[in-house]
Image: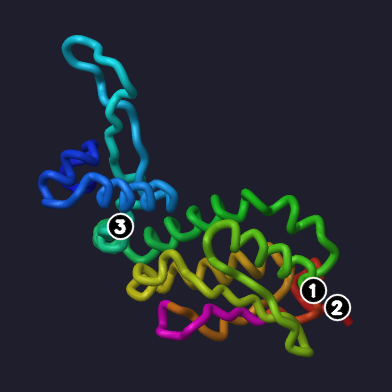
Amino acid sequence: MLLEQGPVTAAAVAEVLGLSPTAVRRHIDALVADGEATSREAPRTGQRGRGRPAKLFLLTESGRARFGHAYDDLAVAALRFLAEQGGDEAVRAFAERRMTALVDRHRAAIASLPGPVERAKALASALSREGYAASTRNVGAGEQLCQHHCPVAHVAAEFPQLCETETATFADLLGSHVQRLATIARGDAVCTTHIPNTAKTPDGGEPA
């Protein structure tokens, strides 16, 4: 009802559904408490009466999200069109621009840290703030960066340039060779990237 007819009063919902206004209001109050609905005062019409004005209820963006979106399908269609018009390099250029925009928000803080392990931990925190639910774990010879969620997994399953560019960006930001071990886009449970303890030297090699 709130999706199809909102903004709407609790009384109107109760009348359409054949429920008591009290029961409907309890349910709507729960949606408001969960951040899935919000309210606003109904505009007064005619002569002003006494008492509180009626409230109109409508879904928030969070509430609408429960009904699903076609964002993934739209993104895939857009990248297919980009590939048809500009080839794989156009898709790669898009992926690089996307990662640059994401990393630039955190680059200064991460790059100021002394080594790849410290930077990996900071990168995990940054990625978590971006919705990737990332963490790190020590594996003896280095650190593993684990991304437990990928917001673009559905798209990356068809366009691996997104994962490849992400890996290259991590290597540049961390100042270390990295190896992508697993990706959610390929069906793995977690996107996993191995980061060795040794940093790259200015000529691109490893310290002696």
Q: Nearer the viewer, residue 183 or 6?
A: 6
Q: Nearer the viewer, residue 197 or 140?
A: 140
Mark 3 secondary-structure assignment: helix
Are the residues flagged by discs 1 and 2 in contact, CB closer than 8 Å?
yes
In the current view of this chain or complex, which residue is farthest to the bottom? 140
Q: Which mark is residue 71?
A: 3
Disc 3 residue type (three-letter): Tyr
- Marks 1/2: CA–CA distance: 7 Å
- Marks 1/3: CA–CA distance: 38 Å
Q: Residue at the spot x=57%, y=71% of the render?
A: 167
- Range of residues picked out in magenta: 185-194
* Left or right position of 102 against 197: left
- Decide whether residue 186 is among the magenta residues: yes
Residue 165 in the image: x percent, y percent? 51, 67
Q: Residue at the spot x=27%, y=28% of the render?
A: 54
Number of marks present in the image shown: 3
Density class for disc 1 (Cα within 10 Å; few <14, some 14-19, many ≥20) is many
- Place residue 44 in its image quadrant: top left
Circle 1 or circle 3, nearest the eye: 3
* Left or right position of 114 against 153: right
